[in-house]
Image (spheres, helix red, strand yellow):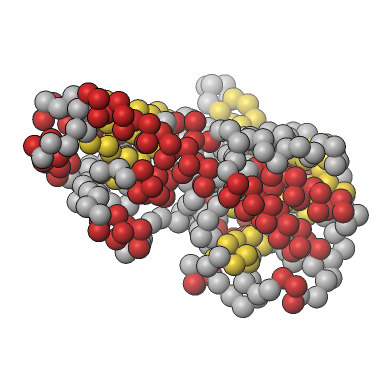
Amino acid sequence: MNDIKTEESMGTIQDRVPSSNIKRIAVLTGGGDCPGLNAVIRAVTKDAINHGIEVFGIEDGFLGLVEDRIRPLNLDDVSNILTQGGTIIGSNNRADPQHFPVGKDDQGNTIFKDLTDVCVTHLKVRKIDALVVIGGDGTMSIAKKITDKGFNCIGIPKTIDNDLHGTDITFGFQTAVHIATEALDRVHSTAASHHRVMVVELMGRNAGWITLHAGVASGADIILIPEIEFDIDIIVEQCIKRSQKGKRFTIIAASEGAKPKGGDQIVDRIVENSPEAIRLGGIAKWLANEIEERTEIESRYVVLGHVQRGGTPTAGDRVLSTQFGHHAMELLKLGKTNRLVVMQGGVLGDVEITSAADKQRLIPANHPLIAAARSVYTCFGD
């Protein structure tokens, strides 16, 4: 990440000279929902109103921007939402203004158009000076196109996957790890009672951050992440060795994007007309079946799924969301344009919003948490 860290981007915000004419802003939550969205909306709205800036909420992400569903937000709207999961203005992970379905041709094929200009027009007609975009890599990729049209966007990094390039952490991640860790903890007792192998499938797409952190936190015996291809023979051998040594169970934390050496990720389904058409899923079932067939050790699997995205954000995510929202407003009040709020090395800062577009932050092979896990005999299947 050092390649995008600049003196300007990571400087102390108080050192910059105020120069803003921002009078009216809009807030948009794009992509999948996650804990902490309302905390960010609350922070941005309260901070803006406190400084005489009007705030509008765009309903259902970029879909609402295309359809011009934009409404005012006031203090009553954001009161008592700090602890609420989800987003009070809605989100959408299928609407991409650059590739928006507008109908079908005579053969029944979907017709797509680039409606980015329509989005910018809706913002300008309402005399909105800047757009606060809350989302992950897909959302920032769309925001980049809006900035290319000359409209000011400030990005706030959101995703439970923690895979947004340029920041050490995104809000929503800490809550997802907490939920995943609790689930892994809970399967210990049932696994031990029946001498089973339990495979818990966790979210993350192509990044294994949730699985790595939750796996280490729960003391999982085997952790499988997309960044390290696994050998099924090694996993089978590990399960057999544990059984022979008198261990009553084996817990496997498996990322949905994990894949065997020389193999492919398991795809649950393809969703047409979606910016993220490939939906991963099924690795836990495959692993449990393979292990039971090869070892004759009873094996079960759990797919945690969207439970990881819901509910009340943890204290850490509430604090981080509030910090991100405040920093976004500081940037706008100081006249900064097209920036992404980030946390690097425990310090709040900002980088060019384009630096996070069309990129994913994956776990490096030399990550210290992987080394720490290996030191306590955690197997990564390699």
- Residue in the picture at 56% in, 33% down: 310
Picture coordinates of residue 72, whole percent (x, y): 85, 39
- Give the left or right position of residue 92, taking residue 224 as reference: right
Q: Quadrant of residue 81?
A: top right
Q: Quadrant of residue 376?
A: bottom left
Establish if 206 lies above or below 21: above
Which residue ends up furthest to the right in the rendered image?
52
Q: Is residue 267 visible?
A: no
How many marks overall?
Answer: 0
Q: Nearer the viewer, residue 136 or 40?
A: 40
Establish if 35 lies above or below 128: above
- Residue in the picture at 72% in, 34% down: 88
Picture coordinates of residue 329, whole percent (x, y): 76, 58
Q: Quadrant of residue 89?
A: top right
- Give the left or right position of residue 2, taking residue 367 as reference: right
- Give the left or right position of residue 245, taking residue 80 as reference: left
Picture coordinates of residue 264, whole percent (x, y): 27, 41
- Residue in the picture at 67% in, 56% down: 323
Q: Nearer the viewer, residue 18 or 367?
A: 367
Picture coordinates of residue 266, whole percent (x, y): 31, 35
Establish if 348 lies above or below 228: below
- Residue in the picture at 74% in, 77% down: 15
